[in-house]
Amino acid sequence: RKKVTIQTIQNLYKKNEPITVLTASDFPSGHVADTAGMEIVLVGDSLAMVAMGMEDTNEVTMDEMLLHCRSVNRAVKSALTVSITIHTYPSISILHHQNASTSHSPQQIADLPMGSYETTPEKALESAIRMVKEGGMKGVKLEGGAEMASTIRKISQAGIPVMAHIGLTPQRQHSLGGFRVQGKSAAGAVKLLRDALAVQKAGACMVLIEAVPPEVAEIVTRRLSVPTIGIGSGNGCSGQVLVQVDMLGNFPEGRFLPKFVKTYADVWGEARRGIEAYREEVKSRAFPSVEYTYPVSKEVLEEFEK
Ligand code: KIV
Ligand code: NA
């Protein structure tokens, strides 16, 4: 299987073909994102909530991120020989094995968690190197705009691709006053554009834009010469990202979902239905029925029962 590289992403960008990005936090979620054809798998620090049950992303540590990165990395690597994809034609779906040479293994990028990069560019570079050497990642993402320029430059100049994350930056929720739309005022839109241009100049290879009105994100996208990846920022960005458990509906009822999340499946409902059916069948002894057991000969049984 061909690996998606920064060059592959550049080519998609030049062709104006949207770049597909999805988060993953462990082996199964990495494997399914890989086999379903994602170009970039992002080990986002949102795994603090969706995989570890924490309140917000600020609690997760570098070592915890690395553990998840390694699990995701094994999945993306293991999908090297053959992948199963569903091709949807106007009226039929065919499940088939895709030709290995036409299939791509996604680029892997991880979030630098809070506390691993803000203090100095040197510290940030050390964290980025750990993501590559210990986590198996190809690049890192970090939150912040113009003020992170020297850090982005330091990491990029060491040869590690950096995705900058601007707009709504969840690690800074307390100074932003919560999860709020960014770039909504004229001044906010100007700040967003300045941040985008600054991180691009510093060497960011992509710019993630979170929770920004679509018109503003589209103008920022047009002003840049590197791809933008949108979340909650409309379809004028160069690509899109969602948090996998959110778009799969793999969460209990009552979980707060931002307006921008489209839910494409009901994985939670399906899992719960399955587990409840199993529970019922165990209680009623309907499971395991004979087809789920190993046979033994009458002679052996007679001998055994003596
Ligand atoms: O942590 C995360 O999942 C993110 C999103 C913007 C995709 O950063
Ligand atoms: Na994140």
Image (cartoon, rainbow, N blue to C red):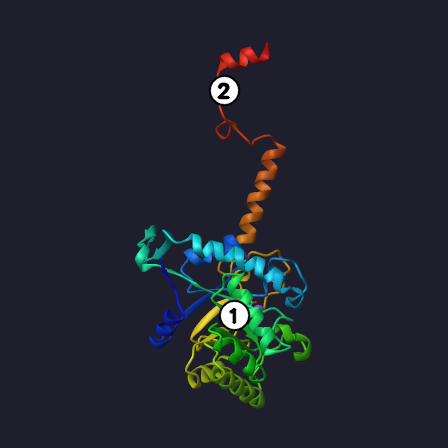
Which of 110/150 is in front? 150
Q: Quadrant of residue 39?
A: bottom left
Q: CB at mark 2 closer than 8 A to ligand 1? A: no
Residue, x 59% and y 30% (percent of image)?
A: 285
Give the labeled residue for mark 2: 296
* Total marks in image: 2
Amino acid type at circle 1 is: Val
Image vertical order of residue 121 relative to residue 106, above or below = below
Q: Residues within 10 Å of mark 2 (few under 14, many from 20)?
A: few
Q: Is residue 188 visible?
A: yes
Position of the N terminus, as image quadrant, is bottom left
What SS does tag 2 mark?
Answer: loop
Residue beneath the point at 62% across and 61% down: 63
Residue 231 percent coordinates (x, y):
51, 72
| Amino acid type, callout 2 | Val
CA–CA distance in space, label 1 to label 2: 56 Å
Q: Measuring from the top left, give residue 160's x and y in whole percent.
A: 48, 72
